[in-house]
Amino acid sequence: MSKKRVLSGMRPSGKLHLGHLHGVLENWLKLQAEYECFFFVADWHALTSDYEDPGSIRENVEEMIPDWLSIGIDPEISTIFLQSHIKEHAELNLLLSMITPLSWLERNPTYKEQLAEIKDKDIRTYGFLGYPVLQTADIVIYKADLVPVGIDQAPHVELSREIVRRFNHLYGRIFPEPKTLLTDTPKILGTDGRKMSKSYNNAIFLSDPPEVVEKKILTMMTDPARKRRQDKGNPEVCPVFLSYHKIYSNEDTIDWVKRGCTTAGIGCIECKRSVIPKVISRLEPIRIKREEISKDTGLVNRILKIGDERARAVASPVMDEVRGAIKLA
Ligand code: TRP
Ligand code: SF4
């Protein structure tokens, strides 16, 4: 039996950080070993919100692909490509947009949330509303079986399934309904205790050298109620514990932190110092490989050329099938 096909994309948001590593990339690595994987850079999706700054999108593509490679995403095993190079996504997006009711898009929770939250750019555009339609095209143009996403993206895949059902009902059964492969995404907190994000300026990047990692963790926020060394703390509200010890430390160390923190037996610096080397040793091989990769300036283009071709070889005949079904000849 042939392997099931997995498809996932990431918007080019620049250098990747620990949030991406533990939330997405480690999962991609596992999937790569088991499935036929298509991983792509969603540069058109980035444009839906950052259309005023297209130059930085291209720069971010150049940063992101080396990050993928440095953690072990392997272009010989997986197909790595750039969304905007495969025009079939756009054609299918157009056709799917004909059959997608506005109400489905308007009630999309992510859309409503972002309209309310994002104030620094005008996202009241046709393209932004249609984000999930383009995402559906991304998925079904490869007849992907599985789409690994975090819980926040699950409504989008649900919407994709609805669009596929409507398409198949109207024009014949062409697309499989993509299934969500829900990934357990640990919430990685940044140095200020908020969710790690480049835009919050609180991220530990995969490319940060050891001394920078050390400094970022040493200055990281802790339990805000633990102001002095003699105050007792609560690890369950402390980002150092929740996002670092819980991922990097063994049970003995975790017990040591819980006991030491709640009794003021250990200080925060001591607590941080016990996790810092573990974070550094996870990141060191990644950073070294990344430095190696970035010496080869033509690498990103070479990888995309191969990946684009492989992607197009799948997308193009599917598009023929779709045109036939819609009598577009
Ligand atoms: N929306 C995804 C994100 O938040 C990116 C994406 C675009 C995607 N198309 C996709 C993910 C298709 C999975 C499948 O970054
Ligand atoms: Fe956080 Fe550790 Fe300080 Fe407790 S001792 S508040 S877990 S850094």
Image (tube, rainbow, N blue to C red):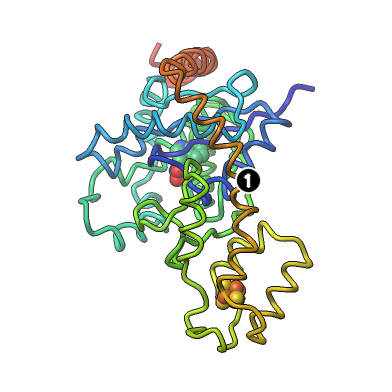
Depicted 196 relative to depicted 83: above or below: below
Q: Amino acid at mark 1?
A: Arg
Depicted 98 relative to depicted 292: above or below: below
Q: Residue 124, position in %: x, y? A: 23, 50
Q: Residue 266, position in %: x, y? A: 64, 78
Q: Please, what secondary structure does the residue beneath circle 1 have?
A: helix
Viewer-proximal residue among 320 and 224: 224
Q: Report the quarter where the N terminus lies.
A: top right
Residue sitting at 58 percent across and 83 percent down? 233
Residue sitting at 34 percent across and 57 percent down? 114
Viewer can see residue 236? no
Q: Is residue 133 left or right of residue 141?
A: left
Q: Residue 263, position in %: x, y? A: 67, 87
Residue sitting at 68 percent across and 73 percent down? 257
Q: Which residue is mark 1?
A: 282
Image quarter for ligand 2 equals bottom right
Viewer-proximal residue among 244 and 127: 244
Residue sitting at 36 percent across and 61 percent down? 113
Please tell me how many numbered marks the rendered image carries. 1
Q: Quadrant of residue 44?
A: top left
Q: Is residue 177 left or right of residue 59?
A: right
